Amino acid sequence: MIVLMLMAVALIAGLSVLAYTLAVYALPFMLGVEATKWAYASGSGLIGAGLIGLVADAAAYGLLIVLFMTARPPILRLAVAFVFAAPAAVAGFALVHGITREAVPSEVWRMIFCLVGGGVTGLSALVRLAGTASPSRRGD
């Protein structure tokens, strides 16, 4: 019984680390899923819808990189990072809500945990986006 509990804790910790790692890609992933659903609903078939989704994913992530590389003012770069970090916060909220659905009986405490989890996920995505996409300063 104790081994199963420890395995469950390890699984939850691993999924949380994976979610925080992939939080930067939440917006491109969501856009790709929606593009795939739209393409499939319009009659493109499974393969065509999958290709449309992959192209939408790549375009959204490419747009992120281009916006970070071309935007010079820090406030504009921060605004772009917020746009890409907001879906990460929503994904973190949903992840914590799914994990605590059966474990936390109190609705108030579950909401507190979900808000904290969403906030931490959003902030980590914001810091990761702002840190990794900063322009290199050569010659300064």
Image (tube, grey):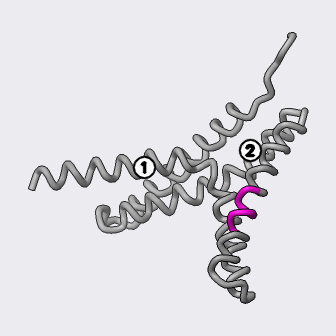
- Residue at position x 71%, y 35% from top? 130
Looking at the picture, which amino acid does disc 2 mark?
Answer: Ala
The front one of 41 and 118 is: 41
Q: Position of residue 140 (x, y in %)?
A: 86, 10
Give the side of residue 43 with respect to residue 24, left or right.
right
- Residue at position x 65%, y 64% from top? 30
The front one of 113 and 21 is: 21
The front one of 25 and 5 is: 25
Q: Residues within 10 Å of mark 2 (few under 14, many from 20)?
A: many
Q: Position of residue 24 (x, y in %)?
A: 63, 48
**What residue is disc 1 on?**
16
Secondary element type, mark 1? helix
- Residue at position x 82%, y 18% from top? 137
Residues drawn in magenta: 53-58
The outermost residue toward the top is 140
Residue 66 versus residue 53 in the image, above or below: above
Q: Quadrant of residue 100?
A: bottom left
CB-based contact (under 8 Å), mark 1 and mark 2: no
The outermost residue toward the left is 1
Question: Which numbered dot is residue 81?
Answer: 2
